[in-house]
């Protein structure tokens, strides 16, 4: 039975706000929101599906915020989305034929690798100021890295924001703010596809999903303002801390 008492609703909204900030500035907010939904009484699979309502709506808010501040590069959105979504479809198909035990080691290995990249080669996710980003057509390797990011998202989903950051900043050389803006576009596309499937399977509980979304949308609006105002180095360390948090979540859950 789902508990809609005021205490649980406040917990869900508060968790949503924090997750919205985290997802907008880095990634891994679902490590907070899915357990919060489960605490209310949702089964794990229903919590995973219902969580996408908040992710979808927070992505819209974040994209609008970045666009308002001229931090969203719309000219290359189509070429970025194409290999990412193709990879997502392939990854989802691969996941359906793979044993469940492989997911956690893959998630943990990927998150540890991301943390090491930030420490050892920070320029990979934080290009020097003034660097002009590449277009996908001028950087063929970007097709591969975006496909890999999409594949990972379709295969595991958890932590895909970090992989998108590595692909967008690493191969196309966008700064972290614009990288986060484009990451939210990719997240919106991923989530829209997932929502269609979950709605078809009748796995979404709309009331807790919309309560959570109220928090994630507010968090996304706050996250955009923070991402634009903070120094690039601060944003990099925030990304590093969130990556370590994701590593811990992979071990515990």
Image (cartoon, rainbow, N blue to C red):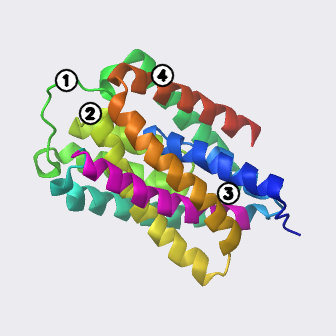
Disc 3 crowd, CA 10 A, few/some/many (<14, 14-19, 20+): few
**Vertically, is 170 above or below 234?**
below
Between marks 1 and 4, how big is the CA–CA gap? 22 Å
Q: Residues within 10 Å of mark 1 (few under 14, many from 20)?
A: few
Q: Tag 3 or tag 1, which sits nearer the N-term?
A: 3
- Residue at label 4? 116
Mark 2 residue crowding within 10 angstroms, few (<14) / some (14–19) / many (20+): many
Residue stretch in magenta: 46-70
Which mark, residue 78?
none
> Mark 2–mark 1 contact, CB under 8 Å?
yes
Disc number placed over residue 129 in the picture, else none: 1
Q: Is residue 55 magenta?
A: yes
Q: Which is more N-terminal, label 2 or label 3? A: 3
Q: As drawn, which residue projects farthest toward the front?
A: 6
In front: 130, or 92? 130
- Residue at 65%, 45% in the rendered image: 31
Q: Secondary structure at mark 4?
A: helix
Label 4 vs label 3: CA separation? 27 Å
**Number of numbered markers:** 4
Residue 1 left/right relative to 104: right
Mark in front: 4 vs 3: 4
Q: Earlier in the sequence, mark 4 or mark 3?
A: 3
């Amino acid at each position: 039975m789902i508990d809609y008492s005021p205490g649980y609703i406040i917990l869900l909204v508060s968790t949503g706000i924090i997750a919205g900030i985290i997802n907008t500035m880095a990634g891994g907010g679902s490590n907070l929101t899915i357990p919060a939904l489960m605490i209310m009484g949702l089964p794990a699979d229903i919590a995973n599906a219902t969580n996408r309502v908040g992710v979808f709506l927070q992505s819209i808010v974040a994209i609008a915020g970045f666009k308002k501040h001229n931090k969203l590069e719309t000219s290359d959105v189509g070429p970025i989305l194409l290999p990412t979504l193709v990879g997502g479809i392939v990854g989802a198909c691969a996941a359906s034929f793979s044993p469940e035990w492989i997911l956690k080691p893959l998630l943990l290995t990927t998150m540890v690798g991301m943390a090491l990249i930030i420490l050892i080669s920070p320029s990979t996710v934080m290009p020097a100021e003034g660097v002009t980003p590449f277009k996908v057509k001028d950087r063929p390797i970007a097709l591969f890295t975006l496909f890999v990011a999409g594949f990972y998202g379709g295969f595991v989903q958890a932590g895909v924001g970090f992989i998108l950051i590595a692909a967008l900043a690493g191969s196309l050389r966008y700064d972290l703010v614009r990288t986060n803006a484009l990451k939210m576009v990719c997240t919106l596309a991923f989530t829209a596809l997932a929502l269609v499937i979950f709605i078809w399977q009748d796995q979404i509980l709309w009331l807790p999903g919309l309560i959570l979304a109220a928090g994630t949308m507010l968090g996304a609006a706050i996250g955009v303002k923070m991402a634009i105002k903070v120094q690039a180095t601060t944003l990099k360390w925030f990304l590093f801390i969130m990556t370590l948090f994701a590593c811990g979540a992979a071990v515990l859950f």
